[in-house]
């Protein structure tokens, strides 16, 4: 039986560090206010005028993952790119990544599932591998949020949360190992789509309405989040989807060696940790340093956990995410 095994992990983070104190000059906020509500102390934002793009950051993360996997870019036969902040409205960032890496004309698929995007992308890769269609798939999550945030007091409830970054993994077909992805579990609940959303530009609200100057004060071009409602749904769905993965594999929460949740809010992560009764050494969080990097947050945290020797062969790794859509997902992996 073919299994999907993660053989390489990489990441990239912009150099520009933006602390909570730095934001005090831009909006009515404070270091204490932000830390109390989110746990975030700083984040990375691409500098204005930088040549960095979502696909370019994804390229750097992919190169790191290829180096870690000890394989050539020419061994990659499919790309799955997860992002909510693509370089262009179209084409997608996957083809730009293929161009940047100068890989042969392989398929490239973009995933638009926001905070759950990386696990959705990983699930797609897993199924392609298990079907025998591909042998080495590059899965990337990359985000540049900073250019689309309302950096005034009006937008402080959302803008202080998000950061920029990219992460990548190489998923390889393996017939001779007990390690690999055990299962993935995907869900959505579209009736709450407008509770966490960027409404415009859209096919119902074309960009020329901005150009003609009539909509300069229209906040629909910035992210909106019903924070308390999202929090209540997130903690419920996180626990559900983690337990779903464990039950599917006849495992218990005591079998988890390491839990990495999408880094949305430290309060959410701590709530889930307490609900599952997991010790600190079994949970990895880095939102304090990077903020919410959406589709990039899980692979970035995975890379750091490996650098910090948090995973060893045979460990049970659980990944979980919840976000806009609403969508939520989990993956259980034997490392």
Image (cartoon, grey):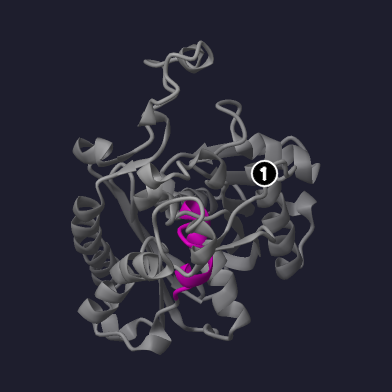
Residue drawn at (59%, 71%) of the image: 303
Question: Residue 89: x and y, percent?
Answer: 55, 27
Residue tagged 1: 48
Front residue of 157/144: it is: 157
Would residue 2 be visible to someone looking at this image?
Answer: no
Front residue of 58/223: it is: 223
Question: Residue 19: x and y, percent?
Answer: 54, 65
Confirm whether the magenta stretch covers residue 287.
yes
Front residue of 240/250: it is: 240
Front residue of 190/126: it is: 190
Figure quadrant of residue 189: top left
Residue drawn at (34%, 38%) of the image: 197
Question: Residue 228: x and y, percent?
Answer: 20, 55
Left/right of residue 176 with respect to residue 244 in the rendered view:
right
Residue drawn at (36%, 64%) of the image: 265
Residue drawn at (34%, 50%) of the image: 323
Left/right of residue 313 with respect to residue 60 in the rendered view:
left
What residue range appears in magenta? 285-297
Question: Residue 266: x and y, percent?
Answer: 36, 70
Provide the major secondary structure of the magenta segment.
Answer: helix
Vertical comparison of 233 with 211: above or below:
below
Figure quadrant of residue 256: bottom left
Confirm whether the magenta stretch covers residue 325.
no
Vertical comparison of 261 with 25: above or below:
below
Circle 1 — which element? loop
Vertical comparison of 56 with 107: above or below:
below
Q: Residues within 10 Å of mark 1 (few under 14, many from 20)?
A: few
């Amino acid at each position: 039986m073919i299994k999907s095994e993660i053989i390489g992990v990489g990441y990239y983070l912009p150099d520009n560090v933006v602390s909570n104190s730095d934001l005090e000059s831009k909006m009515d906020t404070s270091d204490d206010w932000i830390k109390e509500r989110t746990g975030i102390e700083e984040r990375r934002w691409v500098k204005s005028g930088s040549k960095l793009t979502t696909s370019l950051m994804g390229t750097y993360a992919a190169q790191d993952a290829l180096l870690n996997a000890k394989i050539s870019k020419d061994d990659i036969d499919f790309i799955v790119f997860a992002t909510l902040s693509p370089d262009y409205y179209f084409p997608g960032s996957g083809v730009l990544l293929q161009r940047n890496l100068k890989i042969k004309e392989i398929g490239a698929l973009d995933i638009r599932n926001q905070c759950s995007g990386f696990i959705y992308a990983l699930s797609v890769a897993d199924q392609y591998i298990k079907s025998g269609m591909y042998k080495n798939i590059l899965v990337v999550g990359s985000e540049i949020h900073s250019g689309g945030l309302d950096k005034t007091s009006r937008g402080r409830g959302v803008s202080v949360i998000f950061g920029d970054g990219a992460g990548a993994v190489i998923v390889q077909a393996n017939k001779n190992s007990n390690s690999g992805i055990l299962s993935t579990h995907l869900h959505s609940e579209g009736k709450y789509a407008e509770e966490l959303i960027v409404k415009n530009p859209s096919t119902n609200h074309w960009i020329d309405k901005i150009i003609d100057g009539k909509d300069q004060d229209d906040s629909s071009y910035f992210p909106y989040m019903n924070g308390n409602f999202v929090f209540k749904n997130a903690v419920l769905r996180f626990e559900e989807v983690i337990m779903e993965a464990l039950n599917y594999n006849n495992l218990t929460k005591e079998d988890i060696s390491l839990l990495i949740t999408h880094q949305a809010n430290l309060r959410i992560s701590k709530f889930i940790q307490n609900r599952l009764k997991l010790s600190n050494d079994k949970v990895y969080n880095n939102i304090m340093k990077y903020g919410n990097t959406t589709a990039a947050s899980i692979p970035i945290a995975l890379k750091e956990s490996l650098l910090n020797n948090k995973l060893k062969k045979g460990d049970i790794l659980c990944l979980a995410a919840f976000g806009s859509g609403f969508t939520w997902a989990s993956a259980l992996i034997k490392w």
